Amino acid sequence: MSSTALADFLRARRAQVRPGDVGLPVGVGPRRTPGLRREELAALAGVSVDYYIRLEQGKETNPSSAVLAALASALRLDDHARAHLFALADHVAHRRPLRRAPERTVTPSMRLLLENLRPCPALLLSRTSDVLAANAEGLALYHGMADWPAARRNTIRYVFRHPQAAALFGDWRASAAASVANLRTVLAADPEAPDVAELVEELSAASPEFAALWERHDVRPKASTQKVFHHPTVGELNLTWEVLRYDDDGSRRVTVHQAAPGTPDHDALSLLAIAADAGI
C-alpha cells in the first residue's frame, strides 16, 4: 500500500494550522511556510524532526498509535479527521485489508422505498455520490440533472459542473465544501479507490474550486442538515436533509429531503411532484 495518501494528508493539514493556534509565537515578518513548519509540528507531537520528515516523505510506514494520537492533537484534528488519519496509517502499515468492491446494486425493494417517500425527493447514492436510483422528485430537485445520461448523474459532479447549480443551492459554497469533504472519507476505507481517483481527476481539471477544496484534505461524512434551494419551477424550498446509510462501509446511502406537512415548503414539494410527473 502506497504511503502517499498519509503523507499528503499530513502536509495539507500542517499547512492549515497557524502558530498562534497552538500557542507558538507568530514572529516578525512573513513566513515562507504556510501553517506550521515541520520542526514546529514535530516538537508539538514529541517526535524527532527526522522522524516526522520521514512520515511526510512516505519513508516511515508504521507509526504507532501514540505517535498518531500526538500528531492528531498537534494538528487540532476533529474526530472525523482523527479517524481518517488512523485509517490511512493502518493501510500504509498493512494492518487492515482493502475493502471489497463497493456495492452498487439497486434492488426492487430499494426502488419501492424511494417511490413510497414521494413527494419527498429521495436518491440512492454510491460512495462517490453516483445516482444509482431516484424518485421523480429527487431528479427534479436537482434541476437539469435528468438531462444528463444516467451514467453521468452524480451529485458532486452536479455541484461543480452543472450550470444551474450555483443558482439552485442557497449556500453553494457550503454544499461544495461538504461534498468534497465527504468524498475524502472514502479514502479512509480505500486510499487507492479507482472510482474516487476517476472523479477527482475529472473535477480537478474542470473546476478550480473543486481542486482547491480537494487539496485542503478536509474530512467530514455527510450528515443531516437544513438546505435551502432556489428552484426555478417551484421557488424557494427550505428542507430538512436526512442521510440514511444502507451499508456499514458507506457503499450506498439514501438521501431524503423533507418538510413538515402543512408548511409552504411541503406545498412546494407537492408542486415539485406535479411538475416532475408532467415532465416540466
Image (cartoon, grey):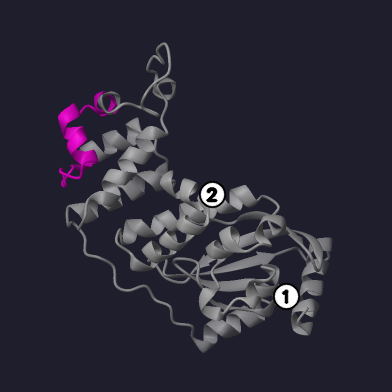
The extreme front residue here reads: 205
Q: Quadrant of residue 137?
A: bottom right
- The residue at which mark 1 appears reads as 119
Residue sitting nearer the eye, 50 or 160: 160
Check disc 2 and report its element: helix, strand or loop: helix
The image shows residue 135 at horizontal and vertical percentages of 64, 79
Callout count: 2
In the image, residue 42 lies in the stretch drawn in magenta: yes
Q: Quadrant of residue 162?
A: bottom right
Q: Is residue 165 left or right of residue 44?
A: right
- Label 1 – label 2 distance at C-alpha: 33 Å
The magenta-colored residue range is 41-65
User: Which image quarter is the C terminus in?
Assistant: bottom right
The image shows residue 275 at horizontal and vertical percentages of 79, 77
User: Which image quarter is the N terminus in?
Assistant: bottom left
Q: Say which of marks 1 and 2 sits in front.
A: 2
Q: Residue at x 43, y 13 (%)?
A: 29
Residue sitting nearer the eye, 30 or 94: 30
The label on residue 58 is: none
Would residue 263 be visible to someone looking at this image? no
The image shows residue 196 at horizontal and vertical percentages of 39, 63
The label on residue 209 is: 2
In the image, residue 44 lies in the stretch drawn in magenta: yes
Note whether 261 is above or below 63 in the view shown: below
Residue sitting nearer the eye, 219 or 230: 230
Note whether 62 is above or below 248 in the view shown: above
